[in-house]
Image: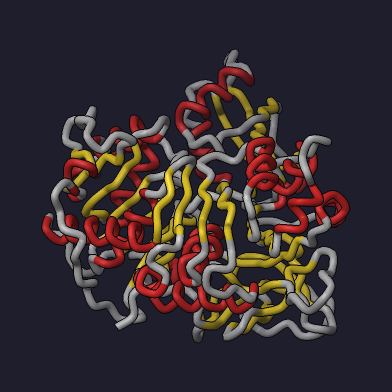
């Protein structure tokens, strides 16, 4: 038997009184988190959830996230973490596509109305029978018809539950990713995928029991934080200080007052911390305490590495990964000086190579090819999408859609995206979805969406729009239209009107010319 929830159970047995989670004034021990997760598991089984059933979770960085996450796993079910910024249409899509049988949703704005509407509308409730509302006040009645408050559902339920047996290759989590083509797809990750990635992370960072205090600013629904902070942190009985929303000034205060030894973020977060640093922040103290600073999600500019080191005396270590790879693939070795622009070398147990369009290996230092990966970290496949899986998998190798090169010492460098994925604040945005929403506006004839550089965000989302004859729609009109229909990280911040769009001979927009 292998179950991802063992990471929590083992630390709860070995270090029951160690503080596991801190949210504001709330502090929960490992024994407390494990007991609450057992209650969640017992609730799910009592409500008919069985081995392999899918259970969706919409929750920011609060103690309830790991409690429900590991509770679902203990029940033998599969966790489907959802981005808390999704709109109702998008929530419904994910519930339907994952075939979720139950849905846990935090009451806090804006997720409550969109989560409730997503559950009730678009046919999602026909399959997803159970809607549990996570409330700040466990005794409060449910404000949503058809929803049951989690506090009421757990009241009086025993904290004794024997974890449902699962195999290592059973699915544990489905992470939705835009990938490189089509609608968002669910990357199906096994218990073995995620357990090994957590263990390897602790091996890389030389983490030992009760050593680290993580400041968790990345959302736990994202693969980066879920593995590097939560799963790896729980495996080493670390303390996780959860931050529901990244605000650089507030994060600097926490770094300056708490004994934070481990910090993980996307490049734009490090940029924001450097920009927000003031004389009243003890940067030297932060640097003395911080044992590891880790970055991934998009390319880390040399200026940020230098700026963070100059101000805090800490070297940011860069890695590379994807939702489909649990996520870690490569990482900067601790024993080596980081190489500007490099994401390091393959982690233990993982092979990386470069391939051309026909899967032929690209040899030679400095040659560019598509990054392909094989190892314990590679997903089972895209849930219910055998054709999409076959497009990216061959003989155990997964091709990423990212172009890279390798130097003579085996260090890897990301060159570009094969497709036109936009990365804004560490979140993947697929232009086709944004284009489809914009083109549903009656005054829009054609919309082409591209990413443009923007300091502090990595990339910004820009739409180039051709209006219908006689249309008077303005930039503000389209920005408001998108804001109402798409998650906050997806909708365009820039709209430019054009009479025509440059095209290839086959009628495809020349996005490189627009950029």
Position of 341 with respect to 138 (left or right) is right
Above or below, 449 relative to 42: above
List x then y, in percent, for residue 48. 12, 59
Q: Residue at x 81, y 77 (%)?
A: 336
Q: Residue at x 68, y 67 (%)?
A: 319
Quadrant of res 105: top left
Above or below, 332 relative to 450: below
**Which is more toward the observer, 29 or 42?**
29
Q: Residue at x 48, y 22 (%)?
A: 442
List x then y, in percent, for residue 16. 38, 66
**Which is more toward the observer, 503 or 87?**
87
Q: Quadrant of the C terminus?
A: top right
**Which is more toward the observer, 219 or 13?**
13
| Residue 390 shows in this picture | no
Position of 428 with respect to 35 (left or right) is right
Q: Quadrant of the N terminus?
A: bottom left
List x then y, in percent, for residue 144. 22, 30
């Amino acid at each position: 038997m292998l179950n991802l929830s063992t990471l929590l159970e083992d630390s709860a047995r070995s270090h029951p009184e160690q503080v596991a989670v801190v949210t504001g004034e709330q502090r929960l021990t490992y024994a407390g988190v494990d007991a609450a997760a057992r209650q969640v598991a017992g609730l799910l089984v009592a409500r008919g959830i069985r081995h392999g059933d899918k259970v969706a979770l919409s929750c920011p960085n609060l103690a309830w996230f790991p409690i429900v996450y590991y509770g679902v796993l203990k029940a033998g079910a599969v966790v489907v973490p959802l981005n808390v910024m999704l709109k109702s249409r998008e929530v419904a899509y994910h519930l339907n596509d994952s075939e979720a049988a139950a849905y846990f949703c935090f009451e806090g704005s804006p997720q409550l109305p969109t989560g409730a509407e997503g559950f009730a509308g678009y046919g999602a409730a026909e399959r997803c029978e159970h809607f549990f509302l996570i409330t700040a006040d466990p005794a409060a009645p449910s404000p949503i018809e058809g929803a049951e408050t989690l506090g009421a559902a757990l009241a009086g339920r025993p904290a004794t539950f024997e974890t449902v047996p699962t195999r290592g290759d059973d699915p544990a989590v489905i992470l939705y990713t835009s990938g490189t083509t089509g609608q968002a797809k669910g990357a199906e990750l096994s218990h073995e995928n995620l357990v090994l990635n957590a263990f390897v992370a602790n091996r890389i960072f030389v983490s030992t029991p009760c050593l680290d205090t993580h400041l968790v600013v990345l959302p736990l629904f994202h693969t980066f934080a879920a593995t590097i902070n939560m799963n790896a942190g729980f495996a080493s009985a670390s303390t996780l200080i959860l931050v529901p929303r990244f605000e650089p000034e507030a994060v600097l205060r926490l770094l300056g007052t708490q004994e934070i030894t481990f910090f993980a973020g996307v490049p734009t977060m490090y940029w924001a911390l450097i920009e927000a640093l003031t004389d009243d922040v003890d940067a030297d103290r932060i640097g003395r305490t911080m044992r590891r600073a880790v970055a991934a999600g998009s390319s880390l500019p040399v200026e940020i590495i230098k700026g963070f080191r100059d101000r805090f005396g800490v070297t940011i270590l860069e890695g590379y990964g994807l939702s489909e790879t649990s996520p870690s693939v490569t990482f900067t070795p601790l024993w080596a000086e980081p190489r500007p622009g490099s994401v390091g070398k393959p982690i233990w147990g993982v092979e990386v190579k470069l391939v051309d369009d026909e899967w032929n290996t690209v040899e030679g230092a400095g040659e560019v090819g598509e990054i392909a990966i094989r190892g314990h970290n590679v997903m089972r496949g895209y849930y219910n999408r055998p054709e999409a899986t076959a497009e990216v998998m061959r003989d155990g190798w997964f091709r990423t859609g990212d172009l890279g090169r390798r130097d003579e010492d085996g260090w890897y460098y990301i060159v570009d995206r094969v497709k036109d994925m936009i990365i804004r604040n560490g979140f993947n945005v697929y232009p086709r979805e944004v284009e489809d929403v914009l083109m549903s506006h009656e005054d829009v004839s054609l919309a082409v969406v591209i990413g443009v550089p923007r300091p502090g965000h990595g990339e910004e989302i820009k739409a180039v729009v051709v209006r219908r004859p006689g249309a008077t729609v303005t930039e503000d009109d389209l920005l408001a239209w998108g804001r109402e229909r798409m998650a906050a990280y997806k909708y365009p911040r820039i709209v430019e009107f054009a009479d025509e769009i440059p095209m290839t001979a086959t009628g495809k927009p020349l996005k490189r010319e627009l950029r």
